[in-house]
Amino acid sequence: MARHRYVPENDLPRLTKLTKRELDFRLPRLTKFGLVEHWVGPYTGYVLYTAGYDCLAINALVKAGVLEAFGKPLGVGKESDVYDALAPKGEQVAVKFHRLGRISFRTTRRTRGYVAQRHHISWLYQSRLAAEKEFEALNIVYPHHVAVPKPISQNRHLVVMGMIQGAELAEFSEIPNPEKTLKEILSNVRKAYHKSGVVHADLSEFNIIMQPGWHTLIIDWPQYVRKEEPHADRLLERDVKNVVVFFRRKFKTRTTLEDALSYVKA
């Protein structure tokens, strides 16, 4: 699918190493289950559905001993779904399915550097790249004690991470100590910038989780950039501005953007 919108049926024996007889048996079953689509145009071809991609990733993680059971949805967003799940030893984890097809293709190409140079790229492959980049970011910042979910595993468009408890900051109309919470968020932005050398690049009240005990967790890292990249400082300033403006508007805090930026960059 990296080269074709619909993979030609005639190419499948070579690509799958299956005989035509085996393919004639399997493809109608996969189509019936809603895992692939059979397409007839100038040629006959097949395309993998999101459900099929989900099955491939889940199967790989189960076989690797990472996942054993799924629970309830924890959140559904414009670019991802997050589910409660269990690891084989009973550990509660969160599983994030990246689903970039929900936003416009032009927006994705404009805002995400890893797809900007590609002429044809499927939604599934974009989602896989997003998952790989987010898992990479978590592995960079987590060892420096930035408040992010613990990275556990990644396969295709799925990221398995430590359990996420709480709700988005945007959902709260009141919190006990807004200035303290803002300082905690800025402290994590500062650690990510100085110790890990990265900028979140998409920080807002919608990807900051208020956990039990009123501590914060920063999620959604697939757009992160390295601090040495030319536009990193501009993105850092935007992240800080988003948070400071939100706190001033909703919780009437007095921290200025200048003070916050000075603290983060110092």
Image (spheres, rainbow, N blue to C red):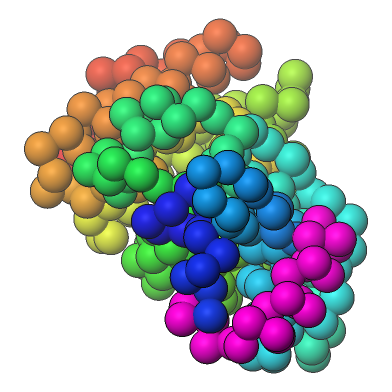
Q: Residue at x 28, y 60 (%)?
A: 196
137, above or below 19, in the image: above
Q: Is residue 228 left or right of residue 263?
A: left
Query: In this view of the protein, which residue sits in the foreground, 178 or 76?
Result: 76
Residue 238: image x %, image y %?
Answer: 33, 24
Q: Quadrant of the C terminus?
A: top left
Query: Would you say 228 lies left or right of 87 here?
Result: left
The magenta span reads 14-34
Tell me which residue sits at (73%, 76%) in the image: 24
| Most common secondary structure along the magenta stretch | helix
* Quadrant of the image occupied by residue 177: top right
- Percent across and percent down for residue 222 are 43, 49
105, above or below 96, in the image: above
Outermost residue, front direction? 42
Image quarter for residue 86? bottom right
Residue 81, given in percent of the width and then of the height, sits at 70, 48
Point out residue 54 in the picture as x, y percentages from the top left corner: 69, 63
- Foreground pick, 256 / 152: 152
Q: Is residue 18 magenta?
A: yes
Q: Residue at x 41, y 26 (%)?
A: 107
